[in-house]
Image (cartoon, rainbow, N blue to C red):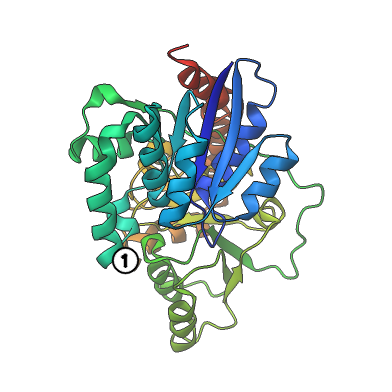
Amino acid sequence: MKRVLFVYGGAKNRGGIYTYLLELFLGLKNERGLSLELSSVSNWPLIDKVEGLGYPTWTVKKTIGGIISGLKKTNDYDLIVTMGMVSNIFGRIWGSYNRVPVYTVVHSDWHTDYKGFRLFLFWVTDRMLRTATKKYICVSEYLKNITIADGISSDRIRVIHNGVRWSPPEKKKQKSSSQFIIGSVGRLHPVKNYQSLIETFSRLANKNIKLQIVGEGTERKKLEESINNLRLEDYVELMGQRKDIPRILSGWDLYVQPSLSEGFGLATVEAMLSGLPVVVTPGGSLPEIIRDGETGIIAKGFKPSDLVAPIEELLKDSELREKISVSGQKYAQKEFSVETWISKMKNILEEGN
C-alpha cells in the first residue's frame, strides 16, 4: 500500500485546486493500492469535505512552526504531492528533510497569478526548493511549455488534462424574461480580464441582453465602478460565489471566457458540457480545449474590439449557436471525462511501486 500525502495551501475563494483535489479523492476512494491523506496549511473547508469521504487529514499552521511540526509527521509517506505556492513550500521542505519523493502539480502560470513581493517570494522559494520535486504534472501543454521555459527539463514533466464531472441540474433555471443571457464563471482577478468583457458588453449593438459573472475576488470594487460608469447597472450582474453553477449555466444562452491566461479552463469545459456555445480568448490553455469554429470560437485577442465580433456573430446566428453547442458538448464528454483523468492520475501516483 503506497501512502500518498496531498498538501493543500488553501484559498479564500474555492477555485480549481479545491475542485481538483476533491474530485481526485472522490475518484480514488476505492483504489486498494493507494492510501491517500490530506494535509492543509491552515484549517480550510476542504478538510471537512475530504474527511467526509473517509480520508485521514491533518492541519498545520501557516508559520515556521507549522513547517517544523510537519517534518515530524511526514517521514512515513511514500510520496508527497504539492500544488500552489504555499503547498509547494511546505511539501518540498518536508519531502527534502525526510527524503520522500515530491510530485508538483502545475495548475496555473504563476507569472500572471502573483505580483510584487509575492511574485518575488515565489520565485526565490521555487529556485531554492525545486530540486525536491521529482516530477511535475501539468494540466495543459501550455503549462508544460512554461515550466520548460522556466528551466525544468521535459523528461520531468507529464501532461494530464483535468477531468470534469458534470451532472445536469434537476431543475433548470427559469428565465424571468426573453433576454439573451451571456455568462462567465471565474474569480474576480485581473488575469480573468472581466474589465475587458464588461467594456465589450457596452459595445454590443443588441441591448436585449444581459451579462452575468459568477465569482468573487479582489477586483469586485473596480468592476462595480466600471459597471456604474458605463451605466450598465440594469444589464450586468456580479453574482458572487455560488454553489449552484449547473443550474445557473442552464439559464444562460452563451458562455464567454475572456481570460489573459488559463492553466486549464475548467469553467469553460463545464459550460461546454452543459451545452452552451462558448467564446474564448487565446489565453493560456484555452486554444487547447477549443476547436475554433467547431466546438467554440477563439477570439483574435483580449481587447473589447477582439471580443465583440464573435459574440455578435453568435447573437445573430441561432443555427451556428446550435451547431457549436452540440459539437462542443460531445467533444468535452469525450476528451475531458473524469474516468480517463482518474485512471491517468492513479497510474502516475503508483509509479515506482
Left or right side of 223 for 185: right
Residue 56: % across, % down: 66, 36
The answer to which quarter of the image holds residue 144 is top left
147 or 292, nearer to the observer:
147
Residue neighbourhood size for the residue with mark 1, other residues' Cα within 10 Å, grouped as few (<14), some (14–19), many (≥20): some
Query: Circle 1 sits on which residue?
Result: 305
Q: Which amino acid does the dot numbered 1 rest on?
A: Ser
257 lies above or below 107: below
Residue 7 appears in the rendering: yes
- Rendered residue at 24%/26% (across/down): 154
Residue 290: % across, % down: 43, 39
332 lies above or below 83: above
- Rendered residue at 52%/37% (across/down): 73
Residue 277 appears in the rendering: no
- Rendered residue at 51%/71% (across/down): 206
The answer to which quarter of the image holds residue 313 is bottom left
- Rendered residue at 66%/54% (across/down): 245
Tag 1 secondary structure: helix
211 lies above or below 143: below
